Amino acid sequence: MPNSLTGGQVPPLTLDTVGLVDRSLGNAGTSGSAPVLEDGKMDPWALPQLKDTGQSWKELSVAGRVLRVATGFLKACGLLGSLYLFICSLDILSSAFQLLSSKVTGDIFKENVVLSNPVAGLVIGVLVTVLVQSSSTSSSIVVSMVASKLLTVQACVPIIMGVNVGTSITSTLVSMAQSGDRDEFRRAFGGSAVHGIFNWLTVLILLPLESAIALLERLSALTLGATSLQPGGHAPDILKVLTQPLTHLIVQLDTDAIASSATGNATNSSLIKQWCGTREVMTSGNSSDCGAAASGPCPERNGTAAVELLPCHHLFVGTTLTDLAVGFILLAASLLLLCTCLVLIVKLLNSVLRGRIAQAVRKVINADFPFPFSWLSGYLAILVGAGLTFVLQSSSVFTAAVVPLMGVGVISLERAYPLFLGSNIGTTTTALLAALASPADMLLSALQVALIHFFFNLAGILLWYVVPVLRLPIPLAKRFGDVTAKYRWVAIAYLLLSFLLLPLAAFGLSLAGSTVLAAVGGPLVGLVLLVILVNVLQRHRPAWLPRRLRSWAWLPLWLHSLEPWDRLLGRCCPCRVCSPPPAAAKEAHCYENPEVLASQQL
């Protein structure tokens, strides 16, 4: 028969055969293959099925079982220790940024004329939160200024929105630690981007509404009018209790210094705390010996009690270095510790979460309620995120812990999204309790600022989560993750543009006046919206567009493709991060040269 395989003859391999073999070999390496798309490609956002190549528990000897238990215990201790040092490094990083930028922060917040512009207030909130690396610090400045009547509640609303946007930079920085693996970086950066995209989309809707009808301000005022609150509440301090024994040995800062700078009561003294307590000391004088057992005061004593200041115990007590020099030292040390801990956390997670353990953890986290109550799973995740953030007292720590888990494939993007939304709610409840601890004359103003923050995040959930079709941050984050996985320099460009260059440009234009800001920013925003609309129509309704606008091929290549920019950066930065992933180059070589696969044994 002509079609039979005789005499060792091998039929010629076509590209379809090569693709089939390539997919089969790809599936053979996993214990459960990812879903296959309609075009035959693997879904890059599907959670990977890691295969445990080690021996099962039954196959191990007694010594092997003891060794496995000891290894698992050491890995768990290493993971907890790395997580603890990571949280401490975030605290030290926040102190470093406060030392470097606290004076500038106070000067910015004192420019009340600039703050009357909503766009300028939004940008200032973003920049200050990025500088001090703490949304709590930025919020406390706003609360103190409102309570001191240096800033109106109406002017603080855009600042609170900017604070909410600026706090998402921490998770983006954490995702950069997984840039070595393309698939892990895609999931991790997509997870961090979904948080920032949610905040930006919420700002784009609520900032114009707030400028037009003062929605959040009126809603918070109505809520306060319907309640009768008394001061005296106390904010939880669980995370600080764990980290302060280590961080206070390194540096301690005066917590009232930045707020004093904002309210105009700043001094030229250092922000580094030198004295941590007082002690009464009796000075020598004419007095009678009342005896050690005397129960009351000695009426004959003429001595006076002097107050002695107790020095703090940390590395920079009595230092001759300036705040700027100490800030740079702490910045370098905290960044080094932060990166080291992130690498260790990712490596340990990859080592621990394998096989059955990974499947069990993934099944619990990504589980859904049975039909018809499956829609409740996301709302339960929101409650879990809010509760954990309330316990940790830091949304940055919570999001920074979730992003590596997304990278290694334990948490899906669809489940991380409601967790991040719950984290936004959780950090506002901490601010509410902190506002309850304010004095009576500051209580209403502090609570109104905290309620504005709460209602802003609640409105974002109503806009971008309640209706499943409107969960736009998820597909946008996936698209963004795909781009950054192919061109990794886009992640750095996103950081610089979103949190530094564009806010600085908007702030500079706002200094020139509202007219200049509208004249320059209005056409640019309109152009961006027009490009987005044309792109959407090109994908879904190309017949609605003129023939010339159905594609961007008539534009220069550098205006509609990242390839020229990638080649340019590849010449300027011939490193591993800027170069194309090796897997992509190998795959292209194989498909361009099918004889390479034809010569191999199937």
Image: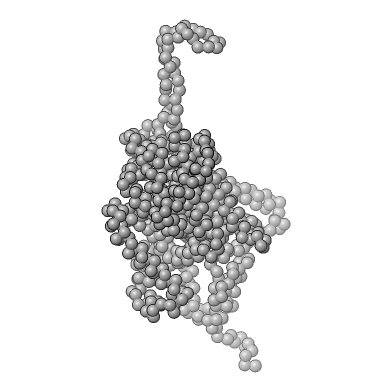
Pick the front one: 272 or 370: 370
- State the image coordinates of residue 590 (x, y, percent, origin top left): 49, 76
- State the image coordinates of residue 516 (x, y, percent, origin top left): 28, 57
Pick the front one: 172 or 80: 172
- State the image coordinates of residue 16 (x, y, percent, origin top left): 55, 81
Q: Quadrant of the N terminus?
A: bottom right
Pick the front one: 243 or 453: 453
Residue farthest right in this picture: 58
- State the image coordinates of residue 380 (x, y, percent, origin top left): 60, 54
The residue positioned 35% from the left and 44% from the top of the image is 109
Answer above or below: position of 186 versus 158.
below
Q: Is residue 159 left or right of residue 75?
A: left
Task: Let me know if residue 515 appears in the view.
Answer: yes
Q: Is residue 297 left or right of residue 210?
A: right
Q: Quadrant of the C terminus?
A: bottom right
Task: Let me know if residue 508 appears in the view.
Answer: no
Answer above or below: position of 47 versus 432.
below
The residue positioned 34% from the left and 49% from the top of the image is 116
